[in-house]
Amino acid sequence: MDSRRLFGPSLWLDAPGVVLDAALDPDRAVDELAAWRIRAQRMTAALGWRSTCTLRRRGDRAALALTAPVDALMTATLVNEWAWAGAATDGEARAAVTMDPAEERLPPDEAAALARLRELLASEANPRLIALMREAAVHGVPVLLDEEQITAGYGVRSRTWPARELPPATSIDWNALGTIPVALVTGCNGKTTTVRLVASMLARSGHVVGLCCSDGVYIAGEQVKRGDWSGPAGARQVLSDPRVTAAVIETARGGMLRRGLVIPSATAAIVTNIAEDHFGGYGIESLADLAEVKLVVARALDGGGTLVLNADDVSLRVAAESRTGRTEWFSAFAPGDAVPPVEEMPITLGGSAWHNVANAVGAAHVARALGVHRDAIDATLRSFGRDNTDNPGRLERFDVGGVRVWIDYAHNPHGLAQLLGAATRHRGTGRLGFLLGQAGDRDDDAIRALARSAWEARPDRIVLKDLDGHLRGRERGDVPAILRAALVAAGAPETLIEMSLGETDGVERLLEWARPGDLLVLPVHALDARERAIQLVQNRT
């Protein structure tokens, strides 16, 4: 069972609320689901809430979501948990199914639960927050919700207060608060590159840019937080900074599923692509499910913002068929005049790195929607990628005594295929060496798919690794063993495969193996491991 608060629109709801995921008993799932919904509806009605209730089932698991007042989300989680606990009991389930959800008189056990919930509700209530939210809506000012702090407005037009020390709504200078240009970037691959491209275009236009991504939080080019900040906390960090005049927010799937979309409004949003990754968690079982999650970012554009979508992605074309808002489509294979000639953009490696062609074209569409002039867009694309510091950890390129080394973040079959496709086109007559690993939270089939994708490039040497800090419930060596078996099953000779002790050890082994003319492709994921890998490479130059 997983019970969560949602601070904004989500896969399940259009407003803040709560969601609970639970495993069903296959023999009585129908009764369980009916009782769960009815018990939740009866209790929310008794508490005086006009809650929307949605139920989503995938196989033997289901999720029930309820809207709730923003100052009652902890109470709402307990309502949902209470409703499920009773529904999972045979007698309670049968009784609840026969009840009218609108019945005013509650059974004795429900009356007792209601009394306890009302006590919690009274302690959680924050009338000043409700008043602030109402006044903000009147003035068209977005509000960022958080357990500890509340921010009204964005960036230079924002104010932040402790959640329990809010001023009276009537005392706030609402004319000083408002929005700034904000872009949301999501997808399965290319998010961080797109964020950095758009941020560079905005900076070239004179903005003080705030961005968050899987590498950290950056304000005016300075890293202020290190690590993966592609979730709600990163968005709040950027949008509450009073220096920021424009923001680019990497918006990862996990954050939207765990906490909803915390950003109430944006100028533009992009979905870079949809690919098989992270299946199984939170009821996400297919590309269609994943596309639905990613398109949650469109909920922030209801005020007239622009949604930018990849026309080369079939899943996105299908998922967006019913969308009625402003949508712009882009294609790596037909970029038109949105960008300079692809061979003139360093990030595309002369046009051979098609995934970066897509990232560049998508970023150009987003920047234009943010009001960036064409000259700034073109100038950025003609220079971005010449230096490894432009896009750390993404297609960084080194020359080590005639051995070419690429360091990248590719972490799923789709991203790996794109990276190795570019490597194949640049391989020349030299050999190809490859470092391969996967996080332990992927299931065995996903790990095998990654191995098959790697073997498509027919590398001459494959070093298998565990991802430092990403075992996630598996024992050391488990993932490399699955990768090895899948590679052999796909036709890779065992003599080409080597096991390493970790990411740094794997880099060292490939550097020792390589000779001038070879190309080494090193997907390295953890920040610390990447820094160690780069140091090893630079020490060889």
Image: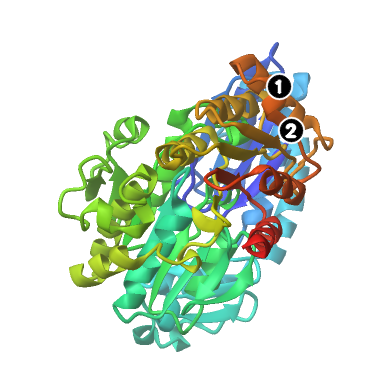
Residue at point 33% right, 67% down? 383
- Residue 140 or residue 528, whichever sits in front: 528
Residue at point 55% right, 43% down? 518
- Residue 33 or residue 434, whichever sits in front: 434
Q: Going by the image, does 460 lie left or right of 188?
A: right
- Label 1: how many Cα within 10 Å (few below 14, some 14–19, many 20+): few
- Residue 490 or residue 520, whichever sits in front: 520
Q: Which residue is mark 1?
A: 494
Q: Quadrant of residue 304?
A: bottom left
Viewer can see residue 41: no
- As helix, strand or loop, the secondary structure at mark 2 comes to strand
Query: Looking at this rendering, what residue extends furthest in the top direction?
Result: 27
Q: Where residue 485 sits: x, y (%)? A: 71, 20
Q: Quadrant of residue 214?
A: bottom right
Circle 2: residue type: Glu
Circle number at residue 163: none
